[in-house]
Image (tube, coloured by chain):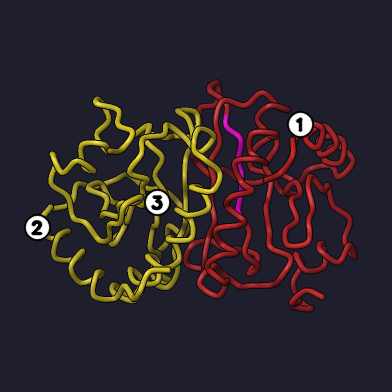
Chain colours: A yellow, B red
Amino acid sequence: MHKTNERCIFCKIINKSIPNAIVYEDDKFLVFLDRYPINYGHTLVIPKDHFDNILEMPINLVGEIHSLVPQIAKAVITTIGGNGFNVSQNNGKSANQIIPHVHVHIVPRFLAEKIKGQWPTRRIANIEDLKNLAERIKMNIGNIE
Amino acid sequence: MHKTNERCIFCKIINKSIPNAIVYEDDKFLVFLDRYPINYGHTLVIPKDHFDNILEMPINLVGEIHSLVPQIAKAVITTIGGNGFNVSQNNGKSANQIIPHVHVHIVPRFLAEKIKGQWPTRRIANIEDLKNLAERIKMNIGNIE
């Protein structure tokens, strides 16, 4: 049983009471495509236990979630043909954290873009499109270490 | 001996051939204050071995550098009285990575700010001011796990 906050939307995604485009899952972490992406392939990595921010999280779990990030990012970039990516994790309202459940953003970037590294207005993605993309990314994930 | 790129400015900081405001150092990592901060207390955590991006880095080392991040962030926030912080790590020119040596940004944020989470134009900090701040942050770092 995971540490859950019943008002948390990410805890509901973990419990599968909200549908999502899941890329990877194990006993500690869930990886899914952001419904409000800032770029194509925008992926979130979250711990299954609820922690508001990384200061509340066990240090070794912060290390573990970030060990997963390059492995997922590589699969995302391979799938969509991106040229780079931002890894971003916000703590607190002042840092623009919107959902108070730790999440690591993987935002693919493309050399043709003009908004390098900026965080533009989000759009709403179609869930079926995201599910199709998630299936393609899954095929590019090797054995997770 | 560390894996070094002789044209890399961060490798020169590691070798101490460029002065900097060092917050923490061990055999694998160096933590120092950004000379071009986007906010007060902007801190960088880097591996001493040179890797262009996290896809080139051993996975366990990516985990280790991020285990350090909350411990450093807590000391920074305690020292300067911040309300939150962004953890941000850019990979590739398309992702606005300026120095091609892996670095994790810790950017303190304040509720009074209006630019929540945005990345404004950087300023140039005075090195003596940074060294004084680094000494104060050091005093708030406990035993690193």
**Residue underneath mark 3:** A105
Residue B113 location (% of width, % of height): 55, 26
Tell me which residue sits at (32%, 56%) in the image.
Answer: A43
Tell whether B50 sits left or right of B119: right
Query: Residue A66 or A91: which is nearer the viewer?
Result: A66
**Residue underneath mark 1:** B140
Q: Main secondary structure of the magenta part?
A: strand
Q: Let me know if residue B22 is in the magenta part.
A: no
Above-or-below relation of B113 to A81? above
User: Which amino acid type is marked by label 1?
Assistant: Asn
Determine whether label 1 and label 2 are within 8 Å by CB: no
Above-or-below relation of B3 to B59? below
Q: Can you tell which of label 1 and label 2 is closer to the viewer?
A: 1
Q: Which residues are magenta?
A: B104-109
**Quadrant in the picture for residue A3:** top left
Residue B83 location (% of width, % of height): 57, 25
Residues flagged by tags 1 and 2 on a common chain:
no
**Residue underneath mark 2:** A128
Residue B58 location (% of width, % of height): 56, 71
Dot 2 or dot 3, earlier in sequence: 3
Tell me which residue sits at (79%, 78%) in the image.
Answer: B6
